[in-house]
Amino acid sequence: MAGENQTVSEYIVHHLTNLTYGKLPAGYERYDGSIVGDGGAWVMAHGGAEAAAMGFTAIHVDSMAWSIGLGILFSWLFYRVAKKASSDVPSGLTSAVEMIVQFVDNTVRDTFHGRNPLIAPLSLTIFVWIFLMNLMDLVPVDVVPELMMALGVEYHKIVPSTDPNITFGMAIGVLILILYYSIKVKGFGFARELAMNPFNHPLFIPVNLFMEIVGLLAKPFSLALRLFGNMYAGEMIFILIAALFSAGLAWMVPAGLLQIGWAIFHILVITLQAFIFMVLTIVYLSMAHEDH
Amino acid sequence: MNINLTLIGQVIAFFGFVWFCMKFVWPPIIAAMQEREKKIADGLAAADRASHDLELAQEKALERLKEAKHEAAGIVDSANKRASQIVEEAKTAALTEAERVKTAARSEIEQETNRAREALRAQVAALSLAGAEKVLGATIDQDAHADLVNKLAAEL
């Protein structure tokens, strides 16, 4: 909930600011009036302006920590099941994990025709990891930030998939795999595919190259933006509904109901977004494997 | 919402987790699932086979039973036949024996009759001889008149 001496817009901005650790350039005047000395300084950013000033040499500590933490949770959970996997009657966690594995395996089999031992585990990782990151959206927006505030941490954003760095990071990973398998499977054919499509004439090579490269880059770009956009918008609505609480006691009940309604709807969105990211990854990699 | 080093961190984390999943998570789980699938398929096939076997066994048993019944009927039949044959044989034997006994008795009777008749004839010859002797008053030479007496006795 918004604090006593905080406007709604301050409240929203606060919720949308990552905990950033980075290098401030030399000569930058900090929030308390001090001037950064020669060679810059590695500090925790205080507010969005300082974070922006840090440029590329900064890291979102909260996004990174939650993303890696959830990745480890996924790995640990599934590794525990994998370690005691047997052909006996499954139960409890094993059944749940096997259900997910079966689901991913079926999706991969339906979409990806070919043999590549990477695709299925890649899809499983993407699906579960993104799902877990999205799931953080369902934690009430104020719980973790307020807790962190009490511990002295100023900013905290717990949904890694609302950070474009995270979604673009994964999409770049997918792009690297697309390029790797395109070159591995097609070899020189990949360059020909870029240069000679859609107009099969030497004169059109620059046009073709431009169009094909834009098409190639559009794939990870759309992956990243779709996930980011959906999650960011979803979180934004959670924050806006939460801001209603500050409008007085009369708003408590409708705001609470809205929060519940949006959360229930959001369960669908987070699963769907994880699934779409996974399916599109499989489709793109399948295209990378197709030799014309 | 700045693009910064987080991007590169996430790329590295991404490949790390994918590698881990590919190395340690996916293969054992999928292997266990496939093994279970095979086990279940085998079990179902075995159940199928067993039910088929049962059906076959039932059929065979039924056939065997029918055969046994048939055989038993045959045995009873032949036994009956044999019994009646034995009875028939016994009857024939008895009849033959009776016939034989009857014939023997008859021949014995005849013999006895003949013997009696012979004795009677001898006595009659002797009697008539004695009578004639008396009548003639003279002793008839037995040897001389034996032919005569015998002729007389044969006429009796």
Image (cartoon, coloured by chain):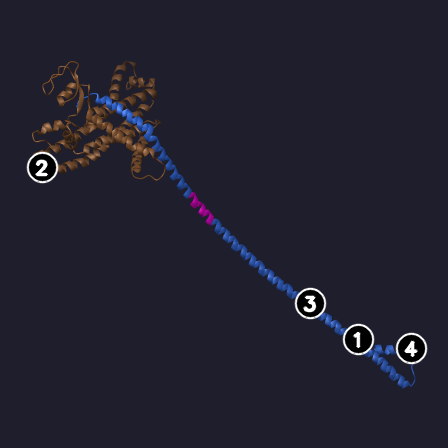
Q: Quadrant of residue A192?
A: top left
Q: For mark 3, what is the residue?
A: B97
Q: State yes or no: discs 2 and 1 in contact (Cβ < 8 Å).
A: no
* Helix, strand or loop at mark 4: helix
Q: Residues within 10 Å of mark 2 (few under 14, many from 20)?
A: few
Towards the viewer: B84 or A266: A266
Is residue A219 in view from this perspective? no
Towards the viewer: A180 or A186: A180
Mark 4 residue type: Asp
Closer mark to the observer between disc 2 and disc 1: 2
Q: Chain of mark 3?
A: B
Tell me the quarter of the image containing the C terminus of chain B. Answer: bottom right
Residue B15, placed above or below residue A265: above
| Numbered label attached to residue B115 | 1
* Hue used for the chain lettered B: blue
Q: Quadrant of residue B89?
A: bottom right
